[in-house]
């Protein structure tokens, strides 16, 4: 394990986690759809937007002395999950450095079921499509350009606050939920 630039955050590099995979409980905080698409074989899916309902599960793992590592696509949502769990009275849990992107780049074992676009890619597609459509419509109806400006403002706010309202909305769509048998 190695400390990152934030003194209170501990990250686990993919190689270290790979060597200890059987001894660690991995909590994946991505959407169920992303989790279903590709995941670490031993991971449990506790989506970030539902994490409050699963604090007791994480607490019992910590109380039993198991090491818990948080995982998401790149690390951002895992940091948010870490903050939520600290607010709930848990210690600052380690995060997989670089998330699933780093895990896959390091050839960590994965389970792949249904290939789906990750949430960040969905947001870029939807935001870009709305901006493009607004610009095209503004040729005929000039006020439509304000829609493009609103989406641009939303992206700036998302970057500034490290949250994304569009991502939160998209995470609720059936595409981002697990398949039902």
Image (cartoon, rainbow, N blue to C red):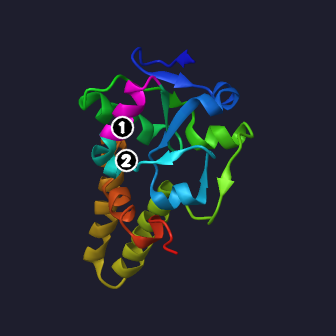
Question: Does residue 147 appear in the picture of this structure?
Answer: yes
Mark 2, residue position:
48
Instruction: Report the front residue among 81 and 57.
Output: 57
On screen, residue 143 above or below 159: below
Q: Tell me if 60 is positioned left or right of 38 in this view.
A: left
Q: Are marks 1 and 2 in contact (CB under 8 Å)?
A: yes
- Please state which of the two labelled residues, at mark 1 or mark 2, is closer to the viewer: 2
| Prevailing SS of the magenta stretch | helix
Magenta stretch in the rendered image:
56-65
Residue 175 image position (x, y, % from top left): 47, 70
Location of residue 16 by image quarter: top right
* Residue 80's disc number: 1
Mark sitting on residue 93: none
Image point (42%, 72%), residue name? 174
- Residue at 34% from the left image edge and 32% from the top image edge: 59
Where in the figure is residue 42, as x and y percent of width and height? 59, 43
Mark 1 or 2, nearer chain start: 2
């Amino acid at each position: 394990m190695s400390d990152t630039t934030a003194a209170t955050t501990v990250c686990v590099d993919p190689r270290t986690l790979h060597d200890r995979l059987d001894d660690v409980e991995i909590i994946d905080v991505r959407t169920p759809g992303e989790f279903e698409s590709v995941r670490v074989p031993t991971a449990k899916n506790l989506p970030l937007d539902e994490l409050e309902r699963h604090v007791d599960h994480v607490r019992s793992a910590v109380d039993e002395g198991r090491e818990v590592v948080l995982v998401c696509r790149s690390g951002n949502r895992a940091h948010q999950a870490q903050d939520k769990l600290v607010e709930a009275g848990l210690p600052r849990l380690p995060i997989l450095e670089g998330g699933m992107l780093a895990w896959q780049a390091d050839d960590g074992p994965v389970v792949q079921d249904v290939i789906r676009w990750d949430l960040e890619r969905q947001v870029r597609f939807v935001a870009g499509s709305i901006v493009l459509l607004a610009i095209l419509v503004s040729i005929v109806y000039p006020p439509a350009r304000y829609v493009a400006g609103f989406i641009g403002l939303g992206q700036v706010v998302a970057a500034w606050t490290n949250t994304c309202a569009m991502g939160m909305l998209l995470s609720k769509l059936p595409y981002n939920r697990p398949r039902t048998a």
